[in-house]
Amino acid sequence: MAPIAVFFMIFLLNIQLIASSNLTKYSREICTAGRDEILFYNNLVYKIKKSGKSTLFKPLGIAGEVKIESTEIWHSAAPWRNQNSSEYFLTSGYSTLKHKTGLYLIEGKTAVILKDKCKFFKTDSHFQPWSCLASVNNRFNEAFTVKLQATRKKIDITINDTKLSYDNPGLLKAGITVKGETSAMIWFSSKNVFISVGLLQKFDRCKMAKQEDYPIYITNQITDYD
């Protein structure tokens, strides 16, 4: 059996085992992976890198829309101030998925498109064949064509000239995860589809952030990104 298929069988089994548990989302939360951390401070998101006695706080962006299910919490980066809030593209964006097995982060190209630009086989569900085709702009008003074609066994993602193909996607209640050299995370709200492709990192432990977890300047910092 392929390593990616084994990964998702274990991943989905873990999800099923905790189906009766609810997750907690804090406005100030910190999650750990070795010496790396991710910090959610109100509407700001930071990647924290510790090396020796130094600590580097790297802004990931401003927190965008959030979707909370009983066993899943999804969210993606918000648009720039001059971008359309309903459809946008970020060259350096992110998406996260939190559940009892940890918090998963994908940093990379992030697109948000209207659900109206997608076609579903019957009902409005990603558990059946579906596809999307949309053109969205980045902060410089440059257009990016985003195309998705998906079944329960395969998903193809195209962003301009970048083409990615995955077998055996992990189908969760509100979204899809796929692991590879370039991983992907896709989740659905009532009006939008959120797509991020890039590097995947897992954070094992999450807790409410305390004052010692972040420097004072973060409390008033204005974050720009892309």
Image: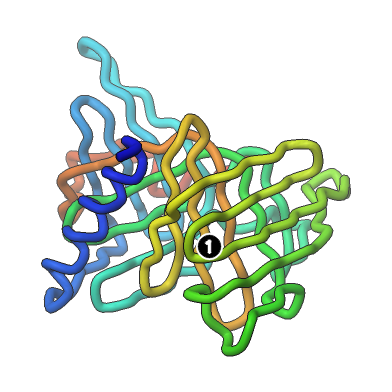
Q: Is residue 224 in sight in this rendering?
A: no
Task: Using the image, determine if residue 95 lies above or below residue 216.
Answer: below
Rendered-image quadrant of the N terminus: top left
Of the pair 209 and 70, the residue shown nearer to us: 70
Task: Using the image, determine if residue 117 lies above or below residue 221.
Answer: below
Residue drawn at the location 18% of the way across and 53% of the way down: 101
Of the pair 142 and 198, the residue shown nearer to us: 198
Residue 43 spot, x, y in % from top left: 45, 59
Task: Report the coloring of the rendering.
Answer: rainbow
Residue drawn at the location 87% of the way across and 45% of the way down: 142
Q: Could you say which quadrant of the image residue 57 lies in?
A: top left
Give the left or right position of residue 158, taking residue 174 as reference.
right
Label 1: few (<14), some (14–19) or many (≥20) C-alpha neighbours in 10 Å: some
Residue 155 spot, x, y in % from top left: 57, 55
Q: Which residue is situated farthest in the top direction here?
A: 52
Rendered-image quadrant of the C terminus: top right
Residue drawn at the location 25% of the way across and 42% of the way down: 203
For disc 1, the marked residue is: 64
Residue drawn at the location 63% of the way across and 71% of the way down: 130
Give the left or right position of residue 31, taking residue 121 as reference.
left
Q: Amino acid at mark 1?
A: Gly
Q: Is residue 28 in sight in this rendering?
A: yes
Task: Using the image, determine if residue 15 lies above or below residue 169.
Answer: below
Residue 165 spot, x, y in % from top left: 60, 44
Tell me the SS state at disc 1.
Answer: strand
